[in-house]
Image (tube, helix red, strand yellow):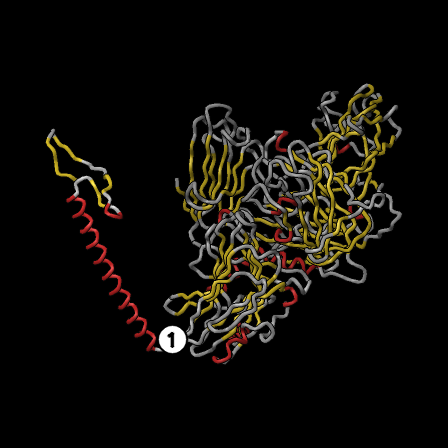
Amino acid sequence: ETEYLLDAGYITTPGYPLEYPPHQNCRWVITAPEPSQRIVLNFNPHFELEKLDCRYDFIEIRDGSSDSGDLLGKHCSNIAPPAIISSGPVLHIKFVSDYAHQGAGFSLRYEIFKTGSDCSRNFTSQNGIIESPGFPDKYPHNLECSFIIIVPPAMDVTLTFITFDLENDPLPGGEGDCKYDWLEVWDGLPQVGPLIGRYCGSKIPPEITSSTGILSLSFHTDMAVAKDGFSARYNMTHKEVTESFHCSNALGLESGKISDDQITASSSFYDNTWLPRQARLNNENNAWTPSEDSSKEFIQVDLHVLKVLTGIATQGAVSKETQKSYYVTTFKLEVSTNGEDWMVYRHGKNHKVFHANTDSTEVVLNRIPQPVLARFVRIRPQTWKTGIALRFELYGCQITDAPCSEMQGMLSGLLPDSQITASSMRDLHGSMGAARLVASRSGWFPSPTQPLAGEEWLQVDLGVAKTVRGLITQGARSLEGSTSAENRAFVRKYRVSHSMTGKDWTFILDSKTNLPKIFEGNTHYDTPEIRRFEEIPAQFLRIYPERWSPAGIGMRLEVLGCELPGKITDISTNIKYTLQRHFFQSDLQRSRETNKPHGVAEECTTEWSLGGLCDFESSLCGWTPDSLSELRWSFHGGSSSPDVGNFLHIEASPRTERQRARLLSPMVGPERGPLCLLFNYQLQGPEGQGQGSLRVLLRDNDHEETLLWALKGDQGPVWKEGRTILPQSPKEYQVVIEGFFEHGNRGHIWIDNIHMKWPIRHQSQEVCYGLHVCPTSPSASRANSLSLLSPPGVAVPSASEPTVETVSVQPLPTYWYYVMAGGAGVVLLVSATLAVGMCCHRYHLAAKKKSHHNHYLGPGGVLLPMLSIRLETDGHRSSQC
């Protein structure tokens, strides 16, 4: 059925929350009222579909109104999908069930997606207050706000809530069950970094600390109940880092820094006097006890962020009611980064069994032989005395407590996807964001099913040169919700190379052998591993897998480091460009409507149209996307490095094959010119995987187009310079820069530094083609070679420039048209004479054939046999052919 979205609504499986029927094939099409609006789907956490890799029962969401739209998600199992947002005004939803194994199904809420630009803010001061819009009055309806705290290097941020009152979920459940109004806290950028928690109701959330450099809050309200909102205080503190630091701090169970909500258990004793919150070390009122004494029971702590775990202290308890002693004598440790994928801690090849208490009061400290990275920690008692009773404390530190160990932006999202590249990628529709440590639920998988050691690589561009001190690596899983071992992959050993330019690479060497060092990788697909090395200056890092798990190569990554000595990077500038890429499409839309860049004074357009340089650092300079093109140029926000800066790009993808991205210049006035057009470009795509084309055309007021310049094929990963002549015209025209891919597996097209140089004398147009006359752009230092175009009569050096098709558009004198018309007439007359001669010749041959019956007079007068074919009908001979 078709739903026209006037108000928010719900879609459920038949019979929800009871079991859905078999043999279902249901479809819904949701349409927003306005073409510019998008749709958001939010799923009820009570989600249950048969989970055999989504082959039999599943829900499928696609952009558009049919099965042919881009796939936004295909889901099954018992984990509710995250919020899904359409790219346009229409969503297509399909639910399928087979004949067996039905579940409760799903319920989802659909509504218009709201950006909330009026209520979103960034915070960069050392401390401040964040409040819901209108606080202390009730917050408005239909909000979608983001509050992003940007933290300088070598500092932590702590968020403490003062008041909190949001619409409560009438169906209480576990954390994250808020469906109507909620506040989400992210350890990084919203929807990119790991989600710390989703909160609603009137219970104040716990204190939250982050060291990734970014802490974000996303505030959502619906169309119904409004409450008083929230107020929170954040405070940044400097970290005291020394080479002699010890990673052995108490993580907060005894002190109360870890809240009651962060402590959960498989079960609790029935009388509610032995609850998980009573499991704090030295708690004076009993301890945690499960409903039954079993090795299947466990107690769990959510640390909110990834931390290094180095030790566990345990303690038993004496019952306040019976005065009996209870304690755990041995236990196993389990760790996870997401609360779903667990690893039992091993020492060697076997599960490590920790020896705990011998009485109910003594505190026993167990050091973890090999410290482990985890967000979620479980203790699972194995043996006990009298019964299970446990109080405990966890010890460790933050990853960034070590010297020069700041996370460089993979986990938090500070590094955009465009700065993550790889030799190949198995999922052609996937994003390189899959390679982010912890934040990604999948990972990077190279395309070869049987790769060769050292052939595949994963690369990170830090944007500017940094001091790099270490790496955190993690395995990957290819299918969300699947438990199949074949889909769990990790890298056991790898090599690391580094570069300052992205061209010249140097391996980290083993000090003993002076050969490329082989680093020990992972032993489990979920558990991260830290590997540190001597400090190196680098902007680019590459990891080359050498050995991997039976399931193949799978990796997620974070880089650890700090600023180069004497250099300070303004993180607010980095995040400005990181956030800017999310909003570039809407800016293009606004600039198309106003024919000038959004938020930029008219003088910019005027200045560029008179021949200035457009480097896209502060605006689009009057360039606008072609409203008729299927594809849009995307904006890449550079770092603070002047050699990179901002540019426009398109990336190869099977979804965009042969779709053309077109950019239109401001109008060039009549009788201006000839002009010299210069620009920088990169055109990269391995042969057979991403054959790209870049073209420059002229479009007049009647939308007639003339090709000026064209380039096809891989030109390498370096900046080059393109040049061509813009002719003098009696009418206004626009310059069109067009890019597209014939094949869409890998590759990119980048453009930057568009420059019109004028006037150029007609008799000396070669100044635009010479190597030394035309002025180069400010970033010409990155142009590896020049692509030169030659007009008629102008010689060009035969250097190793790319092959370029060029079309001359100089006006011809009138008499040339008469000359061409006369020539065409002569050609037509000659063609007619030849045609008549050939017909006569064929007639003459036919006459010879008839006179010789079934023979043909060949060369030299010799009679040659021929094949005679007769047609006979009803026994009567017909004419000979």
Hey, which residue is sitting farthest top in the picture? 386
Hey, which residue is sitting farthest left in the picture? 876
Quadrant housing the C terminus: top left
Left or right: 518, with 814 as reference point:
right
Residue 355 vertical position relative to residue 591 in the rendered view, above or below: above
Residue 310 vertical position relative to residue 696 in the rendered view, above or below: above
To which quarter of the image does residue 436 belong? top right
User: Residue 179 placed where, x, y %?
Assistant: 56, 41
Residue 802 vertical position relative to residue 346 in the rendered view, above or below: below
Q: Which residue is found at the position 48% from the left and 50% from the top? A: 657
Q: For numbered disc 1, what is the local secondary structure?
A: loop
Left or right: 317, with 421 as reference point:
right
Residue 151 vertical position relative to residue 207 in the rendered view, above or below: below
User: Residue 4 placed where, x, y %?
Assistant: 41, 46
**Number of numbered discs on residues:** 1
Left or right: 43, with 457 as reference point:
left
Q: Which residue is found at the position 46% from the left and 29% from the top? A: 97
User: Residue 432 placed where, x, y %?
Assistant: 61, 47
Task: State the residue position of label 1.
Answer: 812
